[in-house]
């Protein structure tokens, strides 16, 4: 297993409490990375939904007709589409920008692609951490088994 400085550590030389601490640290890191992965997936799904909304809900057929405008994921208000050529896009941190439907589509496609690349990188990191965790668990299990067999052997010879 590599330490933060990139040096290798022989896990067999670590004590059981040290191995337990390494395992706990890896568990915590893996939990955090998995949560981040889930949040990135949710953001990607949100951007895909925005793309679908533009493709299906912004057209000259809808202009002037009542529609539901999403304010949050669960709150919609009635409204009408005034201009089918331009939409308001949430560009993050509470800022909204008016864009043409083509530019909005490009914006959301770029976001989906960017998140896809981040998800792929994060997936590789999660896989590496999972492998490291498995190795630590195996060494820890071997140490505990050898300690318990040594303890039972010493009690049977006494």
Image (spheres, rainbow, N blue to C red):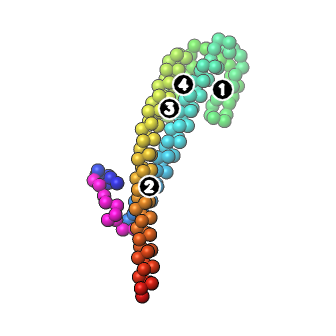
Q: Residue furthest top?
A: 60
Q: Which residue is mark 4?
A: 89
Residue 17, disc: none
Which region is colored magenta? 7-17
Cα separation, mark 2 vs mark 3, equals: 38 Å
Q: From the viewer's perspective, is the residue at label 2 or at label 3 nearer?
A: 2
Q: Which mark is residue 92?
A: 3
Q: Find out whether the residues at labels 3 and 4 contact each other: C-beta distance under 8 Å.
A: no
- Would residue 11 be counted in the magenta stretch? yes
Q: Quadrant of residue 11?
A: bottom left
Residue identified by numbered label 1: 69
Instruction: Provide the secondary structure element on which disc 2 rests.
Output: helix
For the residue pair 53 and 19, the one nearer the viewer reads as 19
Judge left or right: residue 70 versus residue 3.
right
Name the residue rendered at 50%, 18% in the picture.
103
Mark nearer the N terminus (1 vs 3): 1
Q: Quadrant of the C terminus?
A: bottom left
Q: Residue 73 vs residue 142: left or right?
A: right
What residue sits 45% from the left and 30% below the top? Answer: 114
Marks 1/2: CA distance? 48 Å
Ranked by sequence position, the earlier of labels 1 and 2 is 1
Is residue 27 in view? yes
Residue at the (68%, 15%) spot, across then down = 62
Residue at image mark 2:
134
């Amino acid at each position: 297993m590599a330490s933060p400085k990139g040096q290798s550590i022989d896990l067999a030389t670590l004590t059981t409490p040290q191995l337990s601490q390494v395992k706990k640290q890896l568990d915590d890191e893996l939990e955090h990375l998995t949560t981040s992965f889930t949040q990135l997936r949710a953001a990607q799904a949100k951007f895909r939904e925005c793309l679908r909304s533009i493709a299906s809900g912004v057209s000259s057929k809808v202009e002037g007709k009542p529609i539901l405008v999403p304010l949050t994921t669960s709150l919609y208000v009635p409204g009408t589409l005034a201009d089918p050529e331009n939409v308001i896009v949430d560009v993050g941190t509470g800022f909204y920008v008016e864009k043409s439907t083509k530019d909005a589509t490009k914006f959301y496609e770029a976001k989906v692609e960017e998140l896809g690349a981040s998800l792929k990188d994060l997936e590789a990191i999660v896989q590496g951490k999972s492998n490291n965790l498995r190795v630590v668990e195996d060494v820890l299990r071997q140490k505990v088994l050898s300690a318990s067999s040594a303890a039972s052997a010493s009690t049977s010879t006494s």
